Image: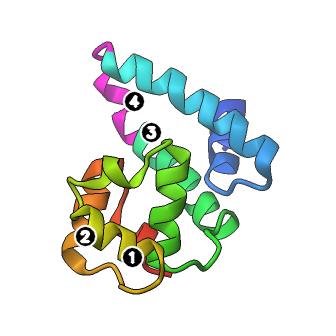
Amino acid sequence: MTLTKEVVEFANALHIQDDIHLQKIIEESREIAERVEAGDDSLHSVLDILIGAIEAYEDDNFKFPAVSPEEMMRWLMEKNNHKQTDMTDVASRTVINEILNGKRKLNRSHIERLCVKYSVDANWFYP
């Protein structure tokens, strides 16, 4: 049995070797996603497999540094140019101030609201 070039390339995509290969697979995944969105359902399972390969590579190679939930909140605030006054949908200004000054810890409710506010997964807050 002779394997076609496409089958060999697809098999190689299942194990991403480096960041250059990752970028190539991401680009190909985008093209396939566009075709799926345009109605080509035959490629849906291929897209799922490629996304799984991308996620596996990223999980193995891109780790968040271990930071406290409070440091993550501070980073998200800085990244989004948010001040304490922008955080009243998470907690009162007093509570936000205490968290940022190390006098208080984030609780589960705060983290849930931060996840909604910044569209991130709760895993961002748990080292």
Q: How is the image coloured?
A: rainbow
Which residue, given by chain and number where applicable, does mark 2 sit on? 110
Secondary structure found at label 4: helix
Q: Amino acid at mark 2?
A: His
Viewer-nearest of labels 3 and 1?
A: 1
Q: CB atoms at circles 2 and 4 under 8 Å apart?
A: no
Q: Dot 3: what SS?
A: helix
Q: Residues within 10 Å of mark 3 (few under 14, many from 20)?
A: some
Separation of residues labelled 3 and 4 (CA atoms) = 5 Å
Marks 1 and 2, how far apart in space? Answer: 10 Å
Task: Find residue 115 and report its horizontal and vertical position in percent.
Answer: 30, 58
On the question of residue 68 being in view, the answer is yes
For label 3, the residue is: 46
Q: Tell me the tag on residue 99.
A: 1
Magenta-span inclusion, residue 122: no
Distance from Cα at disc 3 to Cα at disc 1: 45 Å
Q: CA distance from mark 1 to mark 4?
A: 47 Å
